[in-house]
Amino acid sequence: MRKFTTIGAAVLIAASAVLMTACGDGGQQTGTTTTSAIAAPLGTGRPSGTETGSDAQATVRVVAKTGWYEGFEITVEKATVVPDEFGGGAVRIDITYKNTTTDDKTLSIVPNLQVGKEIDAGAGFDNPLVPGKGSATGGVTTTVSKLGDVQHLLDTMTVVYGQAADNQTKIPLRAGAQVESVAPKTLTVSGTLVQDQTTIKITGGTLAPSYAENENGKMDLALKITLIGGSGIPDGGLNVYYDYFTVRTPDGQNVPADIRGPINELLNRNETIDNAKNYVVFVVPAPAVGAYTVTYDADKGAGAAPAFSFTVS
């Protein structure tokens, strides 16, 4: 996995604010409140160019909107704007990252803060390392040289994960604006593939957007498998690799399994391998609904290859 260095951000010092309760994004609501505060300088954010004047109080907007990216459930919790003595201000956006995978991980990309139609090149992101199945807090910080209508400024801001050529997640701060993101789906799939002394049990699956570069419009179809070795497996065992699997998609494409599901197991006589990380992953066209047929062929065409069909709805 590619690793990126987290962009540092200066500390925002502000007095406590009483926050309004907010619901989720289908019925999510945003609330704002103000309180007296003192600001310390933050980063080198871009001037807004359209905001004028100053504000004597901090503004807090509850956002409470959630999107998904790279195995994270990402919730933008709130945004705080603190004016400074020069007519500008500091912005802090608080984000919670929930890791839905079993691996300790951080985002492989640096997100962007979009202000209007522009990317704020001076915004700093704190992307935490999150334990498997755990959560951690992060955020975005930036500064505005001229601070006028704070509510308008917040309405123009969107936290963006991914580039235009990728499957993006966009979480806008404006009340009523919808999150652009696709939630991962758990699939109820079960089936069996038997070839000679190898039995493959498919016990479940997931469907989520691909977050690889330049794969906008692609999805990752992942099937959880258990391996069972027969009594006739010779000494030394049999290898099972990810590239023994192929899936036929609803539009008739034959798609080989991808290395992002790197199965490489040595299966011994009468052995069962039930590794929680053993998923066969296929990169398929979105929206990825319809009938699929998965095939296992360790013989590479030399013998009969078992197949199993299922439907994604």
Image (spheres, helix red, strand yellow):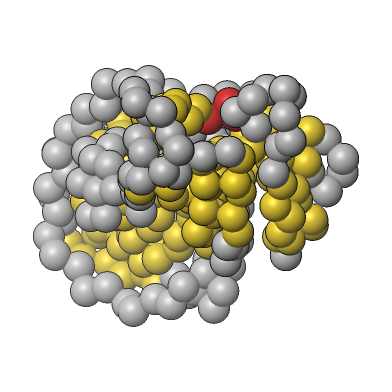
Q: Is residue 218 visible?
A: no
Residue at 35%, 35% in the rendered image: 268
Q: Can the viewer see residue 60 in this picture?
A: yes
Choose between 159 and 122: the one closer to the eye: 159
Q: Residue at x 79, y 57 (%)?
A: 290
Residue 296 position, x and y percent, is: 64, 38
**Residue 76, located in which quarter of the rendered image?**
bottom left
Residue in the foreground of this view, choosing between 128 and 298: 298
| 272 left or right, relative to 172 | left
Quadrant of the drawing holding the C terminus: bottom right
Looking at the image, residue 136 lies above or below residue 259: below
Spot occupied by residue 173 in the image (x, y as percentages of width and height): 48, 56
Quarter residue 179 falls in: bottom right
Left or right, 277 with respect to 114, comes to: left
- Identify which residue, 91 or 249, lies in the foreground: 249
Q: Residue at x 28, y 37 (%)?
A: 105
Figure quadrant of residue 229: top left
Left or right, 164 with respect to 100, comes to: right
Q: Is residue 3 above or below residue 144?
A: above
Residue 238 location (% of width, % of height): 44, 28
Seen from the viewer's position, the closer of residues 81 and 229 is: 229
Quadrant (top left, top right, bottom left, bottom right) of the N terminus: top left
Residue at image point 34% right, 26% down: 235
Q: Is residue 56 above or below residue 145?
A: below
Rendering coords of residue 94 (x, y %): 29, 52
Q: How many marks?
A: 0
